[in-house]
């Protein structure tokens, strides 16, 4: 359900992120017009059945590949190469079939949950009439609260025996109470034979059975070894989903769950599923449209935003829906910044069972920051900054600016501020209806002026700003800085979602993000409510690592101040600081308290990771040592990325690597020079990428024939979170037929942002050009376009639940900790088994190796 909360939040000691989701030949063969369709390599040797099977597999036809190999083995039953290839493909097809069964089951579950939630929504009035709504809700809330009090599987990681026993005692008591409450909720409808009750009762009974299984598993828990925790986690996941199903039936807003599940279904569906033609899908779209309109009319901005956001996914070609979403999001922004902190106007509360899974996302070296107060946000802002930004936009934006649209966006943004009732909390003069009406009338007048003009240019935008500021002085007298920020964000939002102002408040954080390094102690942390900070892992070669901080340590004090009651963002700021300064952490380890005085240093984030992390923090880059298949995971593109990747490949080649997997999934991009340098390591020559904007000259970047892996089999993994620089690399390697691309279509972020200083206090991040691949394809996803990003050669669809499964295991195997080598091997094997996209890559590379050996044998 959509309001399930993540129980554990992984945090790092600083906010940082990037600035900026057939058969190719085995070496880069430049062409004047690189073909988009891979070809099979030519050879003097007649293509073998292995080659034909490989060709089928590279076209995604693994079943046909298996059939070809079986037929070939009937003629040559003693052929070891054919036998090995068949074994590979059979195992893969078994895994793929299992994955497809899971996908269909998850899709059916999502559809079922949509229908259940809509039934619950329609039955609310009847429940209230019978006096059962509050009773059911209270009893299920009791069950959920107790369930949320139970410990998670993640809490066992790195835990000491006494901590495990404490968690066990606490969890058994909590689950016992939750189970009792769930059973009592089911009994409330024992004599009801309505459609609602007939749906509710089986769900409640299933939740009871699964909670019983989970309770028994905790009671039987002896330790925290991998086998036990994996078994526990599987039961935990099913119990959480089951209890969420029951809670949805009595929730005050089950329609939210219906929307969330419909969006999940859209992600999992294949074209042949004909999702849009199914009755339940049509029903949820129709219901959501009606709900969005009503929520907007009632000024329930969070509800309206959720509804329009769902519709934007469900009807992703509907531009009117996207425009509506943009307006509603502005209301939500105003509400969050200027309304009462406790005021939500129907903001969804997290009432359901907390997800027992770990943090979402990839490596998740991120920090959840508290929202800044609006006075901090606007400090140092003035109108002169905006006028300078408008001049820069006029001169350098990637396309001709539609100033009528831009003016409309700026004025609408200010109007939204004034029309959001909750904004009067920060600006009491908005409660004066006479002044408020006069100000809104002035804004409407400006909008009419803009619409009537034959031609609108950047000077009209400046005039509109000054008119708004003058009208404000005469009427509501909102602080000038606030209007400047709202006006600017409004017009930049009409350009694209990547152009923005970096106001004085955000300047330091932005600069840290762009550097890819920071000053601190280098530790990832997590925090449960009311508990002290817990170390997820020290970063390799960091001050924390060198000081002896270990995975599973509790940070109970920072410079003498207890951590359990402090908010995370404050603790992060306490731990970080200037290079050369010290921070004292009081660590609890095995019931002992130890003080560590750690000197802060510059921390560089390592963006290159391998398959298995060693005890010293270094990586083993072989995913399959027996077949010498290398694996490099790139998390983003920073200054150090090309150098670190080159070192990894050099290390692999010295060890005899024959094939390589480059994993760019969940890579948000980064620096353009880093992207082109990475691609250059695989390409002999030819264009890597070109940029073109309205005022920027056409610029091409080409390979230089000096790379470390110019020949050799290569697979690149991508998904819908591979963006920007990751798309440049994967797109160039695909266009030049240098690599097989596996996964799902990338994000489509193919625009160039230049950072332009606005005096010394602010920056304008402005889109000035687009990226084009060697084939001429535009990477960027523009409104209404059906083609964007990089399409895989082999599309391997995976579900959100499947992704979460292997990401959770990977998060664990990425930890720098003392662990039994066999346990780590078991976890890595489970991670590989759960990751069908990676499995596909390795199987193909092994088959290509077999083909190479077959050709070599035939030529001798």
Image: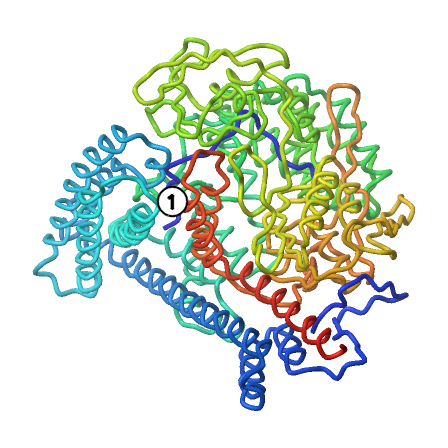
Report x, y in % for residue 606.
63, 35
Tell me residue 79's x, y (percent). Answer: 58, 81
Locate the C terminus and report the quarter of the image it occupies: bottom right
Q: Name the residue at 53% across, 64% down.
A: 797
Residue in the foreground of this view, choosing between 507 and 713: 713
Total marks placed? 1
Instruction: Residue lying at the far front in this picture: please name it.
Output: 860
Instruction: Specify how the rendered protein is coloured.
Output: rainbow
Residue 143 locus on image (x, y percent): 20, 43
> Callout 1: 10 Å neighbours few (<14), some, many (20+)?
many
Front residue of 233 and 193: 233
When the figure is inspected, residue 40 is found, relative to residue 781, above or below; the finding is below
Which residue is at the far bottom?
75
Seen from the viewer's position, the closer of residues 749 and 226 is 226
Residue sitting at x 57%, y 36%: 416
Q: Please report the residue visible at 69 percent of the width from the left and 28 percent of the height from the top.
A: 502
Q: Is residue 297 left or right of residue 61?
A: left
Q: Is residue 438 left or right of residue 733?
A: left
Q: Which residue is mark 1?
A: 357
Q: Position of residue 660 (x, y in %)?
A: 66, 56
Out of 659 and 113, give the one closest to the viewer.
Answer: 659
239 on left or right of 795: left
Label 1 sits on a secondary structure element that is loop
Asked if one can make out residue 758 in the rendered structure from this viewpoint, the answer is: yes
Q: Is residue 289 visible?
A: no
The picture quadrant where one finds residue 659 is: bottom right
Name the residue furthest left: 191
Is residue 694 toward the left or the right of residue 554 in the image? right
């Amino acid at each position: 359900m959509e309001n399930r909360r993540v129980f554990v939040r992984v945090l790092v000691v600083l906010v940082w992120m990037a600035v900026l989701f057939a058969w190719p030949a085995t070496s880069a063969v430049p062409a004047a017009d690189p073909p988009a369709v891979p070809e099979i390599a030519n050879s003097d040797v007649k293509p073998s059945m292995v080659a034909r099977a490989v060709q089928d597999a590279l076209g995604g036809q693994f079943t046909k590949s298996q059939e070809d190999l079986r037929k070939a083995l009937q003629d040559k039953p003693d052929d070891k190469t054919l036998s090995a290839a068949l074994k590979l493909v059979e195992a893969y097809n078994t895994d793929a079939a299992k994955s497809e069964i899971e996908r269909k089951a998850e899709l059916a579950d999502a559809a079922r949950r949509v229908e259940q939630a809509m039934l619950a929504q329609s039955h609310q009035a009847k429940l209230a009439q019978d006096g059962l709504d509050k009773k059911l809700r209270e009893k299920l809330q009791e069950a959920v609260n107790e369930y949320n009090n139970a410990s998670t599987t993640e809490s066992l990681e790195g835990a000491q025996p006494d901590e495990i026993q404490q968690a066990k005692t606490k969890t058994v008591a909590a689950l016992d109470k939750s189970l009792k409450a769930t059973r009592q909720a089911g009994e409330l409808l024992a004599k009801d034979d309505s459609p609602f009750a007939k749906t509710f009762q089986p769900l409640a009974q299933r939740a009871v059975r699964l909670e019983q299984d989970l309770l028994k598993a905790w009671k039987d828990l002896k330790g925290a070894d991998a086998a036990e925790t994996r078994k526990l986690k599987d039961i935990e996941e099913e119990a959480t989903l089951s209890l969420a199903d029951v809670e949805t039936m009595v929730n005050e807003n089950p329609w939210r769950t219906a929307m969330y599940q419909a969006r999940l279904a859209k992600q999992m569906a294949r074209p042949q599923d004909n999702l849009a033609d199914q009755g339940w899908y049509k029903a949820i779209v129709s219901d959501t449209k009606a709900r969005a309109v009503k929520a907007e009319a009632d000024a329930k901005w969070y509800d309206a935003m959720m509804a329009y956001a769902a519709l934007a996914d469900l009807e992703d070609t509907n531009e009117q829906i996207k425009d509506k979403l943009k307006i509603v999001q502005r209301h939500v922004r105003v509400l969050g910044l200027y309304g009462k902190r406790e005021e939500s106007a129907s903001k969804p509360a997290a009432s359901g069972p907390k997800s027992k899974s770990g943090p979402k996302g990839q490596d998740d070296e991120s920090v959840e920051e508290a929202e800044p107060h609006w006075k901090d946000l606007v400090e140092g802002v003035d109108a002169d900054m905006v006028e300078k930004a408008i001049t820069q936009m006029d001169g350098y934006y990637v396309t001709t600016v539609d100033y009528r649209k831009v003016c409309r966006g700026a004025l609408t943004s200010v109007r939204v501020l004034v029309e959001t009732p909750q904004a009067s909390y920060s600006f009491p003069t908005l409660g004066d209806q006479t002044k408020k009406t006069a100000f809104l009338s002035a804004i409407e007048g400006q909008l009419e002026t803009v619409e009537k003009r034959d031609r609108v240019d950047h000077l009209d935008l400046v005039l509109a700003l000054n008119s708004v500021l003058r009208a404000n002085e005469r009427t509501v007298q909102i602080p000038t800085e606030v209007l400047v920020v709202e006006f600017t964000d409004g017009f930049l939002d009409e350009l694209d979602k990547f152009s923005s102002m970096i106001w004085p408040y955000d300047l330091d954080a932005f600069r840290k993000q762009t550097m890819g390094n920071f000053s601190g102690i280098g530790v990832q942390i997590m925090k449960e409510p009311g508990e002290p900070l817990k170390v997820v892992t020290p970063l390799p070669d960091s001050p924390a690592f060198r000081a002896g901080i270990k995975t599973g340590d509790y940070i109970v004090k920072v410079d003498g101040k207890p951590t359990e009651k402090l908010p995370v963002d404050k603790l992060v700021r306490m731990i970080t600081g200037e290079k050369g300064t010290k921070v004292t952490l009081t660590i609890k380890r095995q019931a002992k308290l130890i003080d560590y005085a750690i000197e802060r240093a510059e921390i560089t984030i390592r963006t290159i990771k391998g398959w298995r992390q060693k005890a010293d923090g270094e990586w083993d880059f072989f995913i399959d040592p027996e077949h010498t298949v290398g694996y490099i995971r790139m998390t983003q593109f920073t200054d150090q990325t090309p150098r670190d990747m080159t070192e990894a490949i050099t290390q692999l080649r010295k060890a005899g690597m024959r094939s390589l997997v480059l994993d760019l999934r969940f890579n948000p991009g980064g620096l353009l020079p880093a992207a082109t340098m990475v691609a250059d390591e695989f390409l002999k020559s030819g264009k890597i990428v070109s940029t073109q904007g309205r005022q920027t000259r056409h610029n091409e970047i080409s390979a230089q024939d000096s790379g470390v892996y110019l020949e050799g089999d290569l697979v690149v993994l991508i998904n819908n979170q591979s963006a920007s620089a990751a798309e440049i690399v994967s797109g160039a390697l695909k266009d030049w037929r240098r690599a097989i691309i596996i996964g799902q279509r990338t994000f489509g972020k193919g625009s160039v942002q230049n950072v332009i200083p606005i005096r010394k206090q602010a920056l304008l991040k402005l889109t000035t050009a687009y990226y084009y691949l060697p084939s001429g394809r535009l990477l960027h996803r523009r409104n209404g376009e059906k083609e964007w990003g990089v399409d895989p050669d082999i599309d391997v669809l995976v579900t959100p639940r499947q992704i979460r499964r292997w990401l959770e295991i990977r998060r664990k195997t990425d930890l720098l900790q003392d662990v039994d080598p066999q346990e780590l091997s078991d976890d890595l094997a489970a991670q590989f088994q759960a990751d069908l996209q990676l499995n596909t890559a390795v199987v193909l590379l092994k088959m290509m190796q077999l083909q190479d050996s077959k050709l070599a044998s035939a030529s001798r």
